[in-house]
Image: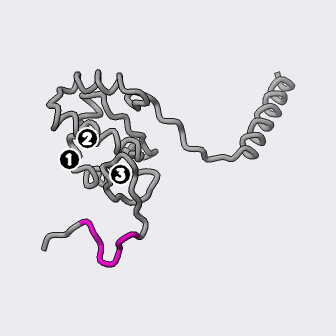
Amino acid sequence: MARSGAQPGGEGRGRKVIPGIMDQEIPQKQYYTIGEVSRITGVRTHVLRYWENQGKILKPGRRRSRHRVYRPADIQLIFEIKRLREEEKLTLPAMRRQLRQQPGSRLFQPQPPPRAFGNEALTLLHNIKKELESLRELLE
């Protein structure tokens, strides 16, 4: 029996339409695994890894376990790469050039780390750092 991606009675729960992703409904999450991205975009996992390693087009983040994590912006980029490949029949180097020229392109841009701390916590850590530095000076 073939499984479809939809769950019975699950319409509209925990899903949202992200603009620019061909109006496709995807689960509302901050990070996606490579398998989830493959199902959402229709691009096989080995192709995603190839675009990352050989094509130098994708740059997904990594967990501590070294598993790839993709953000919604990465999924948008994958749809754009897929469009360039299928409709315009571009090679990987040509895709890289075209994506670099697009304003706001995420190509080769490092992802900022997620904000784990609020302003209060950052201020506290900064004060602790200053105190530790002053203790180190006293010990030297």
Query: Which residue bears the numbered disc 3?
Result: 33
Query: Disc 1 residue type?
Result: Arg
Q: Quadrant of residue 50?
A: top left
Query: Which residue bears the numbered disc 1?
Result: 44
Residue 106 image offset from top left, x and y in percent: 41, 32
* Helix, strand or loop at mark 1: loop
Residue farthest toward the bottom in the current orientation of the protein: 9
Mark 2 is surrounded, within 10 Å at the Cα level, by few (under 14), some (14 to 19) or many (20 or more) other residues, namely some
Residue 39 image offset from top left, x and y in percent: 25, 55
Query: Disc 3 residue type?
Result: Thr
- Distance CA(mark 2)–CA(mark 3): 11 Å
**Mark 1 touching mark 2, by CB under 8 A?**
yes
Q: Nearer the viewer, residue 11 or 131?
A: 11
**Mark 2 touching mark 3, by CB under 8 A?**
no
Q: Earlier in the sequence, mark 2 or mark 3?
A: 3
- Relative placement, left or right, of 17 versus 137 is left
- Distance CA(mark 3)–CA(mark 1): 13 Å
* Helix, strand or loop at mark 3: loop
Q: Which residues are magenta?
A: 5-12
Query: Which residue bears the numbered disc 2?
Result: 48
**Number of marks in the rendered image:** 3
Q: Residue at x 34, y 59 (%)?
A: 25
- Relative placement, left or right, of 129 versus 72 is right
- Distance CA(mark 1)–CA(mark 2): 7 Å
Query: Disc 2 residue type?
Result: Leu
**Mark 3 touching mark 1, by CB under 8 A?**
no
In this rendering, the answer to whether 15 lies above or below 78 is below
Q: Quadrant of the C terminus?
A: top right
Q: Nearer the viewer, residue 64 or 5?
A: 5
